[in-house]
Amino acid sequence: MNDVLEQRVAERTAALSAANIELAKATRLKDEFLASMSHELRTPLNAILGLSEALQEQVYGPLTDKQGQSLRRIEESGRHLLALITDILDLSKIEAGKVALNVTPVDVEGVCQASLRLIHESAQKKQLHVTSRVDLAVSTLAADERRLKQMVVNLLSNAVKFTPAGGSIGLEVTAHPHEQEVDFTVWDTGIGIAEADMERLFRPFVQVDSSLARHHAGTGLGLSLVARLAALHGGRVTLESTVGQGSRFSIVMPWRVTTQDRGPERRQDEHESLLPSLSLVAYGKAGTRLDCGRYASACGAVGTLSARTRRQHHGVSTWRGRC
């Protein structure tokens, strides 16, 4: 009897091991596929966005109002698709453990203002009242600046999306010296979230309103990315919400203060040193680089072509001109 049980356990263990190997292989292939497809989709999409911007600037000639309106729709749709591709690629990289943070001393006020500028236009369209408050005790924070801004912008974009016209949204940064933590809180007076839906809200591809007739567009990746990026920093995301009254999302970050303070004067000096010239670098297929070259030449820049990459039909082109 014992021999039979041992044999069954061994068979089940072997089957589970084989299944785990196949699952790991499938996950790796999925990540490789997503990374490859994201690159292949980004290349032509960037060309579409670049050309639509050039046409809107009337580089190739004047436009009628109807043509300008059509080009704006093309650009908006293209940027929405590019954001979706980027989110999918970021999520696959995080799940595969391939995201490395570039932790540096970050100017907290600068990140907040840059994030607010990115959602200013969409908030203005809905006539939302936007406020911000940064704790004076927090000047710098050790974090990946690009990823921190990505998290804050994501929460702000959601606040704009789910707040009715004429409502209010805000960004608050609060220091907790005893806990050695800093909260980046985004609040709104939007539709709110039921307590029963809060737990699954941070799962990938999950939306509270999953019906086909839902009123708010999106893939359900944003909050999942925010939670995972916060965890990579050693932080977390908290949520307080009341249906019909609004929500408060907080990114709780470890407060690892550094002695290197990138103050406003230094950032301004660095920015001004880059003002006299502008470089446009285009990577990819010859057709894409040719389109970028035409645009750069029309703006008065001088172009050069560097050595090709590993693939014969790919290369790098650089144009330099005055701002």
Image: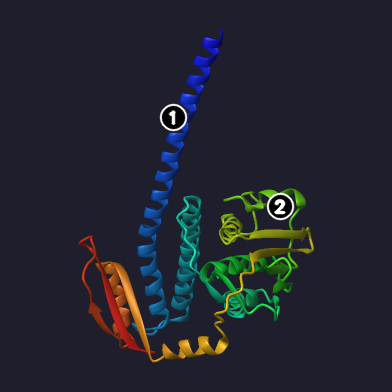
Give the secondary structure at mark 2: helix
Q: Residue beneath label 2, please? A: 198
Residue 170: tell me if it is visible: no
- Horizontal arrangement in the rendering, residue 109 relative to residue 103 (left or right): right
**Gap between marks 1 and 2, in whole Å?**
36 Å
Q: Amino acid at mark 1?
A: Ala
The spot of residue 286 in percent (x, y) is 25, 68
Give the secondary structure at mark 1: helix
Q: Is residue 135 above or below residue 19?
A: below
Q: Residue at x 50, y 50 (%)?
A: 95
The spot of residue 42 in percent (x, y) is 39, 62
Of the numbered discs 1 and 2, the one sitting upstream in the chain is: 1
Q: Give the quarter of the image for residue 139.
A: bottom right
The spot of residue 247 in percent (x, y) is 74, 63
Q: Residue beneath label 1, please? A: 18
Q: Amino acid at mark 2?
A: Met
Q: Is residue 267 above or below residue 208?
A: below
